[in-house]
Amino acid sequence: MSHTIFVYGTLMAPPILHRVLWGPTHTTTQHPPAHASPITFRPALLPAHQRHRVKYADYPALIPCPATTSSVRGTLVHGLTDGDIWRLDVFEGNEYRRERVVVQVLRAGDNGNGNGEGFVEAGSASEEEIETQAYLWTAGTHRLEAQEWDFDAFVRDKMARWVGGSREADDGIQDVDDAVAALRDDLTGGRGVNEGEKDKEGKVLESAV
C-alpha cells in the first residue's frame, strides 16, 4: 500500500528523510536501496495549524489552531510504503502522534524536486486539497517557544550533524537504526517476535529492513 505524509520540519530535507527511510548509507536521491519505492515531493500548505520551536531541540512541533488563520508550509511526500511509515513512527517517537489532516497542494515553489528547499514562495496558488497524515505534537505546549521554527537556519547550522552520524543531533535516527536491527534479528531467528508474528511483520515491514 502506498502512503502520503505531510512533513514540516527536519524531514523536509531529503538527506534526512532518506536517512530515516533507507538507513545510514542512503542520504541522497542518487543512491536509494534496491527495494525502495520511488518517492516524490510536492509543496503543500496545512491550514489552521502552527509550527513552533521546541525548547532545547533542533526540530519543531506542529499544533492545531482551528480558531486562527495561520497555516504551515511544508512538503507532501508521496509513495511511502508500510515499512517507511513504520520507520517514521519510530523516528518521531512518543512526542508526536500521526493524525489525519487535509493539506492544500501548491503549484509554485522549489520543493517539488527533492532538493531540500522546504518552503515555497508566498502567494503560491492552491492546486488541490489532499487528505493525508502529519505528526502532531503531544508533549505539551510548556515545551514550546513562541517563535516559528526556521528551516533555512536548520539546514545551514544543524543538518550536517544530523546526517553525519552524530548522536548529539537527534536520538530519533539512532532509534530507527536500533529498531530496524532488532526487527532484522527477529525475522531471521532472533528474540522478540514469535513464529506466528514473523510472517505478518515481514510482509508489513519488508521495506524497512
Image (cartoon, rainbow, N blue to C red):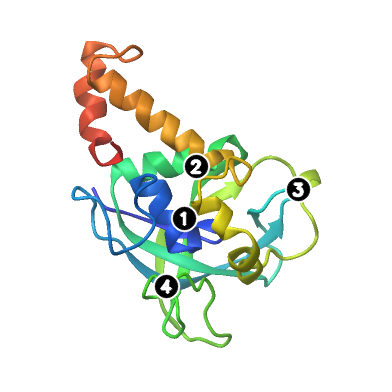
Label 4 – label 3 distance at C-alpha: 27 Å
Residue, disc 2: 173
Q: Is residue 47 left or right of residue 43?
A: right
Mark 3 vs 1, N-terminal side: 1
How crowded is the residue under tag 1: few (<14 C-alpha within 10 Å), some, or many (20+)? many
Find out whether the residues at labels 4 and 1 contact each other: C-beta distance under 8 Å. no
Q: Which mark is residue 115?
A: 4
Q: Quadrant of the C terminus?
A: top left
Residue at the spot of label 3: 56
Marks 1 and 2 sit apart, C-alpha to C-alpha, by 9 Å
Q: Mark 2 packing: few (<14 Cα in 10 Å), some, or many (20+)?
A: many
Q: Which residue is mark 1?
A: 16
Tell which of 6 and 11 is nearer to you: 11
The answer to which of marks 1 and 2 sits earlier in the sequence is 1
Spot occupied by residue 195 in the image (x, y as percentages of width and height): 22, 12
The disc, 4 or 3, on the residue closer to the chain's N-terminal end is 3
3 or 2: tag closer to the N-terminus: 3
Question: Residue at position x 46%, y 67% from top?
Answer: 75
- Mark 4 secondary-structure assignment: loop
**Tag 3: amino acid:** Tyr
Q: Amino acid at mark 2?
A: Ile
Q: Amino acid at mark 4?
A: Asn
Check disc 1 and give the amino acid type. Answer: Ile
What residue appears at the point 63 percent right and 63 percent down from the top-left corner? 154
Residue count near mark 4 (Cα–Cα under 10 Å), binned few <14, some 14–19, many ≥20: some
Q: Is the Cβ of the residue at disc 1 closer than 8 Å to that at disc 2?
A: yes
Q: Which percent across, then down, holds residue 164?
A: 51, 51
Pick whichever of labels 4 and 1 is earlier in the sequence.
1
Query: How far is mark 4 from mark 1, CA to CA?
Result: 12 Å
Question: Residue 112's quadrant in the figure?
Answer: bottom left
